[in-house]
Amino acid sequence: MYKNILKKIIDIMSALILLSILLIPFIVIGILITLDSKGGIFYRQIRIGKNCRHFKIFKFRTMVNNADQIGGYSTSKNDSRITKIGLFLRKTSLDELPQILNILLGDMSLIGPRPDVPAQEINYTNEEFINRHKVFPGITGLSQCRNRHNTTNITRKRYDIFYNNKVSLILDIKIILWTLKVLKKGSY
């Protein structure tokens, strides 16, 4: 019941509350992004969601315009494509906040494995890929709370598949608490 009904209700209610609380910060961040570099406020990218369905993820733009064409989808700690405001947004994970819209659109959950880009499919066997995408991807997840940027594809895959097989309210509460701890430390 939790996995199919209650989790979705919690996601939608939480997203609506968060969106109303974060409206002013969204506007401020949008202005800062516009002042910092040319390009749009949001970055949209194709990701893989539940049941291997593709969707467009929303993020605040943290890199120069056309960054994907310059250097691909992966970034490193000192990536020259990252803007000044982008570095701050990434460090604080504020760049992920527009994914609240993806929750309301029915593409994502608050908690679940981070959504893969299509190029990451090569990291899985066919069975792993299908199993990995049985639940909605999340804004935060088990892998992000455990070794956030220091995890390998193999470890991330294990965390994600473990979560998919063990989804529960208790596990989601633990992930929220772990996420808050990670956010307190910051990223990069």
Image: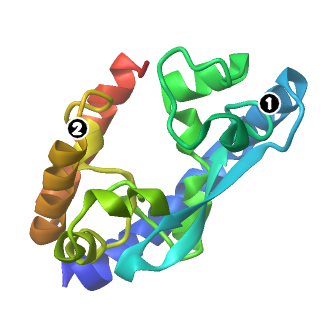
The amino acid pointed to by label 2 is Thr
| Quadrant in which residue 126 is drawn | bottom left
Is label 2 in a helix, a strand or a loop? loop
Is 91 rendered above or below residue 67? above
Is label 1 in a helix, a strand or a loop? helix
Residue 154 can be seen in this image:
yes
Q: Residue at x 18, y 77 (%)?
A: 127
Which one is nearer the viewer's eye here, 97 or 122? 122
Residue 16 in picture, x, y percent from top left: 57, 63
Residue carrying label 1: 33
Label 1 Cα crowd, 10 Å radius (few <14 / some 14-19 / many 20+): many
Q: Residue at x 29, y 50 (%)?
A: 141
Q: Residue at x 59, y 41 (%)?
A: 72
Residue 102 in picture, x, y percent from top left: 57, 65
Which one is nearer the viewer's eye here, 58 or 79? 79
Image quadrant for the C terminus? Answer: top left
| Quadrant in which residue 9 is drawn | bottom left
The amino acid pointed to by label 1 is Ile
Residue 54 in picture, x, y percent from top left: 52, 74
Is 36 rendered above or below residue 58? above
Q: Residue 152 carries which label?
A: 2
All told, the count of numbered labels is 2
Image quadrant for the N terminus? Answer: bottom left
Disc nearer the start of the sequence (2/1): 1
How many angstroms separate mark 2 from mark 1 (CA)?
31 Å
